[in-house]
Amino acid sequence: MNLALFDLDHTLIPFDSGMAWTQFLVGRGVLPAQAEETYLGYCRQYVAGTLDIHAMHFASVAPLASVPRVRLAQWANEFERALRPRVPAAMRALVQRHLAAGELCALVTATTRFIAEPCARLFGIAHVVATEAATADGHPDGALTGAIDGLPCFREHKVTRVQQWLAQQMPGGADGLAAFEHSWFYSDSASDLPLLGAVSNPVAVRPDTRLRQHALQAGWPIIDTA
């Protein structure tokens, strides 16, 4: 079996899922209108390489602390339906080719799990490696606190989180990524260079300037038209 990993924002989808989620909640009166500008400020920090992901996560998740998880799940389903028309057919076809080949596929994203999972369903991806939201009682369905549970799935931690996930998928196997003859990771961002460098087939998708330069120098494939 081979392995195919996919970043989410600006890779499988040509926009930021966190911003889309923020706009979705603002549209329902759950968040104030200024929440969009607050989130945009974090996006600017991300581009500048100065993002504190814990602060971004808290700003996005803490306002939902009092929302019952059943309601949050309902919103996630509505969010999925709202995003369906915005999914590029070319990227859906790319994922389907990997799935049809029998490869183990996963969405690997810094996005919070309850935002990432509806997006993964749009592509038929069963596995999600994402930033986990901490809960007050430690139970997955408990009240959200705004903190991150464990390591964020971000930058160099993406490699660690993927290795942890693979250890769960292959009990007794200690090789992780090295166990696969062929492995792919698709990403748009230089922040993902640690994981891109850990797979056998890194692919840059509409890459930012730094990743494009690195991909050209390393001879990695570049997808610009998805």
Image (cartoon, rainbow, N blue to C red):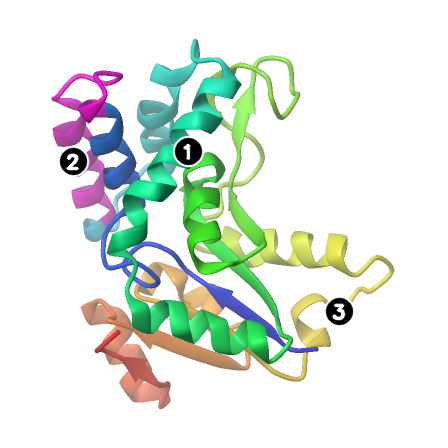
Circle 3 — which element?
Answer: loop
Of pointers 1 and 3, the one earlier in the residue sequence = 1
Q: Nearer the viewer, residue 27 or 47?
A: 27
- Magenta region, residue range: 26-46
Badge 2: residue crowd in 10 Å (few <14, some 14–19, many ≥20): few
Of pointers 3 and 2, the one earlier in the residue sequence = 2
Of the residues shown, which amino acid type is indicated by label 2?
A: Gly
Q: Nearer the viewer, mark 1 or mark 2?
A: 1
Asked if residue 225 is positioned above or below residue 155 in the image, the reply reads: below
The residue shown at (32%, 63%) is 11
Residue 56 occupies quadrant: top left
Asked if residue 130 is positioned above or below residue 103 in the image, the reply reads: above
Of the residues shown, which amino acid type is indicated by label 1?
A: Ala
Instruction: Check contact, mark 1 vs mark 3: CB within 8 A.
Output: no
- Residue 36 inside the magenta-drawn segment: yes
Circle 1 residue: 76
Q: CA distance from mark 1 to mark 3?
A: 35 Å
Q: CA distance from mark 3 to mark 2?
A: 39 Å
Residue 127 occupies quadrant: bottom right
Quadrant occupied by the C terminus = bottom left
